[in-house]
Amino acid sequence: ATETRTNDNMSLPDSIIETSRPVRIDNFSNHYRMMSADSDFRFSEEFEELKHVGRDQPCTFADLPCNRPKNRFTNILPYDHSRFKLQPVDDEEGSDYINANYVPGYNSPREFLVTQGPLHSTRDDFWRMVWESNSRAIIMLTRCVEKGREKCDHYWPYDTMPVYYGDISVQILNESRYPDWNISEFMLCRGDQQRVTRHFHFTTWPDFGVPNPPHILIRFVRAFRERVSPDQKPIVVHCSAGVGRSGTFICLDRILQQILVSDYVDIFGIVYAMRKERVWMVQTEQQYICIHQCLLAVLEGKELKIKY
Ligand SMILES: CNC(=O)[C@H](Cc1ccc(NS(=O)(=O)O)cc1)NC(=O)[C@H](Cc1ccc(O)cc1)NC(=O)OC(C)(C)C
């Protein structure tokens, strides 16, 4: 097998280079400088290498006529092999379907359940997924309406009165508001069972873009991780399509844990692994570069010091 030398003189078999490109943490600042030179030329090159990853995998259930209306976007469909399956209802065709995939995180190969922003018509399915997956945390990375367009249904109550979504009752217990996010606790009830589920809502992340300043995303990931332990899984993550902002968040969460225990960080490999499970995870080159900028800020001790 042929070998390739990486930027910091590591020799890796070509078969590995295609799926991972680890960078020594003590060389990351040089790596960033090299990748961003000539108007981010090597970032563009590397991001382009990810374009087709996973795209040969089938999405047959998403394409069934009974399921097509359950997809927010025609081009964002869940791969069959990693999709979340709802408990089927009687013999109702498609009753096990939701636009959601398991995606690996630092703590588990199925740490995250990544989904689209619920539609009004699929919000009962969304709550069924939260309940049936035993998830205790929901990360929301979009506003419900952005630039006059509906990006996500307001799938939770507007006040503290409990609301039924199918056979699941949801009640807001408390809400803490911060400049760029809100953190709430919901009481979920199904039959005689009760569970508390946290809701982390980032409210200032523009679609197809990055937070301003990008480093604020580090503070949000830390605010989330301070409240949710590594053994709590799966964690439900969504934006509008459940690919761009969701993939960026998961990648940053993963590297912030990895750098505590490893001499290497592999952003290319993390995005590669995510895209094998869900299409377009980390959708834009700007988001891909933002992940590197956030890591650089952390390594150089420049992450935003504003206390929330
Ligand atoms: C570039 N925009 C898109 O691809 C969005 C889906 C999408 C992806 C990612 C995000 N950002 S997010 O993941 O961070 O929420 C929002 C929306 N898709 C649509 O708008 C698609 C059109 C499209 C665009 C690009 C493409 O390659 C193929 C088809 N439109 C579409 O699905 O139209 C409906 C909603 C009327 C059914």
Image (cartoon, grey):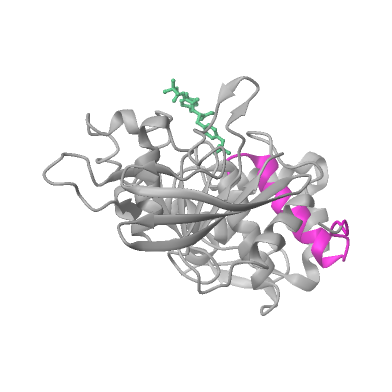
Instruction: List the single residue furthest toward the left.
Output: 91
Res 92 quadrant in image: top left
**Residue 267 location in percent, x, y?**
63, 59
Query: 57 above or below 300?
Result: above
Q: Is residue 121 visible?
A: yes
Residue at screen point 80% across, 73% down: 26
Name the one closer to the observer, 240 or 81: 240
| Residue 62, quarter of the rendered image | top left
Answer left or right for 250 relative to 119. Answer: right
Which residue is nearer to you in this view: 146 or 68? 146
Give the residue at the far front of this rendering: 161
Work out whether 174 lies above or below 122: below
> Residue 14 location, x and y as percent?
51, 64
**Depth order, front residue of 89/233:** 89
Residue, x 51% and y 66% (percent of image)? 16
Seen from this angle, which residue lies furthest top?
Answer: 148
Residue 134 visible in rendering: no
- Residue 289 is one of the magenta-drawn residues: yes
Where is residue 257? Give x, y as percent: 65, 71
Main SS of the magenta part reads helix
Q: Does 288 sit above or below residue 30?
A: above
- 146 within the magenta span: no
The number of numbered badges drawn on the structure is 0
Q: Is 264 or 64 nearer to us in this picture? A: 64
Left or right: 190 in relation to 21: left
Q: Position of residue 59 (x, y in %)?
A: 30, 42
Which image quarter is the C terminus in?
A: bottom right
Which residues are the magenta region? 282-306
Instruction: Single out the residue that lies furthest toward the bottom.
Output: 261
